[in-house]
Image: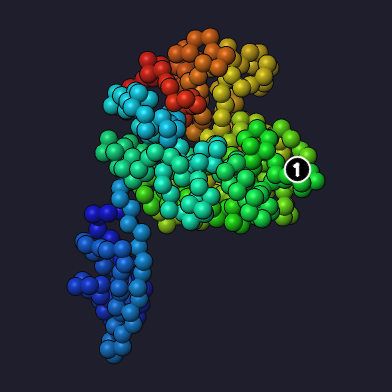
Amino acid sequence: MLANEPLTVAGVTEAGATVAVGGDEATADDTGAFELELADVEDELTIVVTDVAGNSIEVIEELTVIPSRVEIDEIRTVHATFWAWATPSLREPIVEMIDDGKINAVQLDLKDEGGHLGYDSQVPLAKEIGAGIGPLDLEAAVAGLHERDVAVIGRIVAFADPTLASWAWENDRREWVIQDRDGNDYYRGSYAGFSNYTHPDVIAYNLDIAEEAAAAGVDHILWDYIRRPEGMDSYTVPGLETTPEEAIVEFTRLADERLAPYGVQHGASVYGIAADRPEQIGQDIPAMAEHLDYVAPMIYPSHWGVGEYGVADPNRQPYDIVRATLEVWDEAVEGRRARVVPWLEDTTYRAWDRPFQVREQIRATRDHGIDEWMMWNPGSRFTPEAYDRHE
């Protein structure tokens, strides 16, 4: 429940029974239904139910009190690393974009590609492996953004986790990590260590971080790297009994179940190719979309090869490649729970006119009927002149 807001306690018991919480009480109707609105609530409820004969039972319910929450209908956000948010010269231009009405959310890293947490996490495993090295006071950062009526999208890099992988390998938990083909070393690849997306302890670790963030008031959880390692097939996943795609779908189901009590949305950053090439990365988008509120395909123009989706030169045709890929993504989630919120790019990588490229990507998304986007820049440096003000 949200702090400083009333709580409604409702349920069904015996007809005519009295339900009391502190000094408030209600009488169940002829069907046994009751409803009780409480103005002042602690983090624990003691509910006393007394039937018409005078017999009583006491039930204690633990509550998670969330400090604040901001809800938005459409996401328009930029990416901020936790180091960037702690650095005034990088944070203030983003705050100016907020104040100018150009974005309504901040995608703030909680756990990055190094497996580092941006704040002092109280998750026991995070403490044990020394993951919490970041500079943020998470609750204060969230509260500051909420004061501006801005939603916080907490990005959690799940399975690319060299911090966890190296610790697990050295501490006789080698089944927690993806290994080389012979099982002699843990798989390093591009990210220096990939944790095992099928192992219950690895899954629990990531879900614990997400739950901690949700309880701190983070409005959305955005999963990243929920996939198999890319670009290499000769590795071993201890305990994998299904396909990588099925294992990742199961993770989204478990995440949805864990986060449901907190009223947060959760989405996943996914590869642009995953809509029609799921096996290449281990992401079955239609199946994942049953357990997510949105999918965020990374459809950066600079990342597509010549001729992809019939576009001759995607990097010089940002409008065309975004429209073409969104057509494919619409088909992938049709009839599913999740909507599409694309990742676009505001980068210098192969860019020949950066503001124009940004505007064209946003225009293509809007023309396609989606007025939502996430904007990527790895260093959290953006070009505000490329963005329109939204009322």
Residue 303 in the figure: left or right of residue 107: right
Q: Is residue 334 visible?
A: no
Between 68 and 132, which is closer to the camera in this rendering? Answer: 132
**Rendered location of residue 174, percent (x, y):** 68, 52
Classed neighbour count for the residue bearing mark 1: other residues with Cα under 10 Å, few (<14), some (14–19), many (≥20): some
Colour mode? rainbow
Task: Name the residue at the left extreme.
Answer: 23
Between 112 and 197, which is closer to the camera in this rendering? Answer: 112
Residue visible at 30% across and 73% down in the picture: 46
Q: Quadrant of residue 54?
A: bottom left
Above or below — where is 138 with respect to 189? below
Between 386 and 378, which is closer to the camera in this rendering? Answer: 378
**Rendered location of residue 88, percent (x, y):** 33, 27
Q: Which residue is mark 1?
A: 180
Residue 44 in the figure: left or right of residue 182: left
Q: Is residue 65 visible?
A: yes
Residue visible at 55% across and 55% down in the picture: 204
Task: Name the residue at the top extreme.
Answer: 352
Three-letter amino acid code of the residue under disc 1 = Asp
